[in-house]
Amino acid sequence: MDELVTLEGELIAKIEAASSEAALEEVRVSALGKKRVVSEKLKTLGKMSREERMEMGPALNGLTERVGAAIETKKEALEAAALDARLATEKVDVTLPVRPEPKGKIHPVSQVFEEISAIFAAMGFDVAEGPDIEDDFHNFTALNFPPDHPAREMHDTFFFNEKENGSRMVLRTHTSPVQIRTMMTQKPPIRIIIPGRTFRNDSDQTHTPMFHQVEGLVIDRETHMGHLKGTLEAFAKAFFEVDSVKTRFRPHFFPFTEPSAEMDIGYERVGNEIRIGQGEKWMEILGCGMVHPNVLKNCGLDPDEYQGFAFGMGVDRLAMLKYGIPDLRDFFAADARWLEHYGFDPHDQPNLATGLSR
């Protein structure tokens, strides 16, 4: 037994003297490994008498447990010391300025959506939204499109596969179906704008299969063409941030409005710059008109009691005009360098009080 006491003292001393986890591991292996000091002592139990085993067995087990506990205690102390040393070398001076990090930008299309919404919100318009996938009724029939209209053909519209009943869903070709849904579910007066994505089977230097629109709808008992012109002229001045803007309304045809018109604004080109509100040239920016009586009837409204106007504009094109973006295709190029140049700070929230843009 004296031999075990001496052995325990020697092992504890070695454990305490270990200055690193590697050194402590060497002590553990030398003491408790399969062919080491304590293990060799345990092997002698088989040669002892029953009385000796009853005395020596618990003593050896106790020695093993105490040495193991001492090793664990020392290991925890060494790990804590190593962590303290590492923290001391890796400490951060919190008074230093933060490292510069890349900052995201708001896409010009998103910015223009917000600007348009801010302008019409000040006029009392609400924002309405609807699904990108529409049925034939909401996208065509309710909007007074005749059965043989070219927009109903595959070369103009993205159709889904036919259902069992022969009908086909479409990717909406305009945001006008939201006008139909609103008139069918909401009692006049109605004053809404509808921002969103639209889809047409068209792709070239000036057209993309997916583009962005904002449409507007006003339905009331006494709304007339003068209200339409005043609303759109006020919008043009606010959006292009000019004191005055020249406009003209040219007769046009849309199935869902009568009379229909396209709105032109006056501009002049100075070098590569387009100046809105100056010059003698004209540029079309949107389509508009008084809501067709057939559309009102299709929505359950009496055209003898209610009338209103609607308009629609391409957001991508307005962004190009206002911010001098030369190529429509860059909107969809996912080029971080382009976005860094043309994008907007996330904190630039458009409002009429402080200005729509930077």
Image (tube, helix red, strand yellow):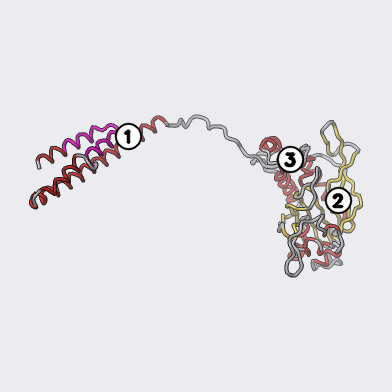
User: Up-down: is 124 above or below 66?
Assistant: below
Label annotation for residue 81 = 1
Residue picked out by circle 2: 229
Residue matched to label 3: 330
Cα distance in 3D space between marks 2 and 3: 33 Å
Give the foreground label among 1 and 3.
3
Residue 73: give x, y in percent of width and height. 26, 41
In the rendering, at what x and y percent does residue 4 appear? 13, 41
Choose between 122 and 132: the one closer to the eye: 132
The secondary structure that most of the magenta stretch takes on is helix
Residue 352 occupies quadrant: top right
What residue type is disc 2 on?
Lys
Mark positioned earlier in the residue sequence (1 or 3)? 1
Residue at the image position 71 percent from the left and 46 percent from the top: 114
Marks 2 and 1, how far apart at CA: 79 Å
The residues tagged by marks 1 and 3 sit, at their Cα atoms, a distance apart of 57 Å
Q: Which residue shows up at 72% across the image and 47% down it? A: 113
Tell me where the magenta segment starts and ends, as one range. 8-32
Q: Is residue 10 magenta?
A: yes
- Give residue 170's position: percent from left, percent from top: 75, 59
**Residue most extreme to the front:** 47
Work out which quarter of the rendered image holds the N terminus and state it: top left
Q: Secondary structure at mark 1?
A: helix
The 10 Å Cα crowd at callout 3, few under 14, some 14 to 19, many 20 or more, is few
